[in-house]
Amino acid sequence: MKYFLFFLPVIMIFFFVSCKENPNDTVVNNYYLSDSLTNPNVQPRVVFTNPANNAVGPFVNYNRTSDYYNISANPQITIQFNKLINVQNLTNKNFSVATEDTTYIPRLIDYQYSNQADPSLRNILIFNLPIKYLVNKKYTFTVDTTFVDIHGLKLNKPYVFTYTPEPQFRVYSYFPTTSDINPLYGTSIKLDLNSSVDSIFLSKVQISPSIKGNWSYSYNYNGNFKTDDSTYIFLNTSDTLLYDTKYTISIPADAKDSKGLLINAPYQFSFTTQPFQINFSSSSSYTGPGGFTVYDHFYFTCNGNIDTSTIRSSISITPTLPFGASFYSYNQNCREFYLNPDIQKMQRGTTYKITINTTLRSRKGAYLKYPYTYSFTTGS
């Protein structure tokens, strides 16, 4: 099967990058070859690649922890020539990356190396390969002889290099990645791996404290058919998390992929949920009967369903001001409430402080960790 992806149009800024010790970690510039870059008598050739031929990963420029729709989450490949190339003339026949079962066409995405006079001319090309590197696979990059430099000269023969980016079974990344997870929506726990796994692997993934649910595979769409992608797993649950709690997900050292490869090391990550808390959402004001600005409505939301019997008694206003409190509940689910101060009793140019104390409780029995305060000042 072949996937053809068009080269992206690019406009780049020319700058120099210094050499580092590890050729697999950086781009090497050979601009001392500047005489050859535009010499019509010099035959084009490849002078540098990243990864190098026979390189073994993992590679530092492959960042699977990024947003998967971001190009930096995909493999990047650098090819450097001794001649300038007009990238506008490149086609999807010039470059390819193949495994034993699939051929891919990389996308040109380099936003760095170009000629100041003509941004289309460059000798360093950086490609994005829109795939996930898998364990124990060899990838072969080919520069075909259909490729030509700015003088129309071709390579004498195809340039080919092979590399193994993922020699060991491992976890690429996980979610959640932060420690401020809303318990209502934080049960989307996911793991991204570099190999397919089976039900035996899923049974070894442990969560502490426990969460009701089962690990499952995500789905990828292939044409009109939905297929399991068992390199990506998630926790399927309708349970909500506990407030202010640290959860730890662990994979033991004896976990294996579907082909029997042991994980390269025990894996563990943690995240912490938010305490039960309030967020100020909005207020409304207008010129009241005394001719100054008054506030007649405040709207608060919580990160969970509220025990509505605790709303009214948890609220106070200083200086003392009469108020009403209301809420809307659907199937006993209430995450917001309204506060309506008595505008007839408001004083001109006065700062009032609304306090919601720690007796406000969620339906699951979690109390506010800290009192919540909000101040407003009437017009002068």
Image: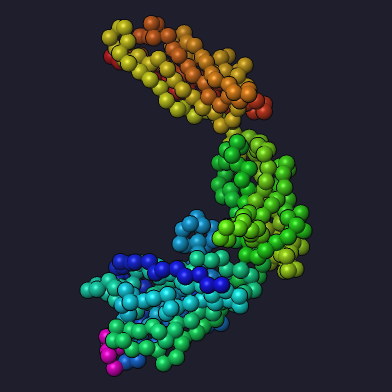
* Residue 194 within the segment the image draws in magenta: no
Can you name the residue that lies furthest to the left here?
Answer: 117
Residue 110 visible here: yes
Seen from the viewer's position, the closer of residues 98 and 59 is: 98
Q: Which residue is drawn at 48% across and 77% down?
A: 96
Q: Quadrant of the N terminus?
A: bottom right
Residue 36 falls inside the magenta stretch: yes
Which is more toward the observer, 112 or 270? 112
Q: Which residue is drawn at 57% across and 68% down?
A: 133
**Which segment did they paint magenta?**
34-41
Q: Quadrant of residue 92?
A: bottom left
Q: Residue at x 57, y 41 (%)?
A: 181
Q: Quadrant of residue 201?
A: bottom right
Q: Which of 186 and 88 is in front in this view?
A: 88
Q: Which corner quadrant holds the C terminus?
A: top left
Left or right: residue 161 compared with residue 309: left
In this orientation, does residue 164 appear? Answer: no
In the displayed structure, would residue 138 be above or below residue 324? below
Q: Residue at x 32, y 80 (%)?
A: 85
On the image, the x and y values in percent for residue 14 come to 29, 71
Q: List x then y, in percent, for residue 158.
A: 46, 87
Identify whether 137 is placed above or below 376: below
Specify the farthest residue to the front. 224
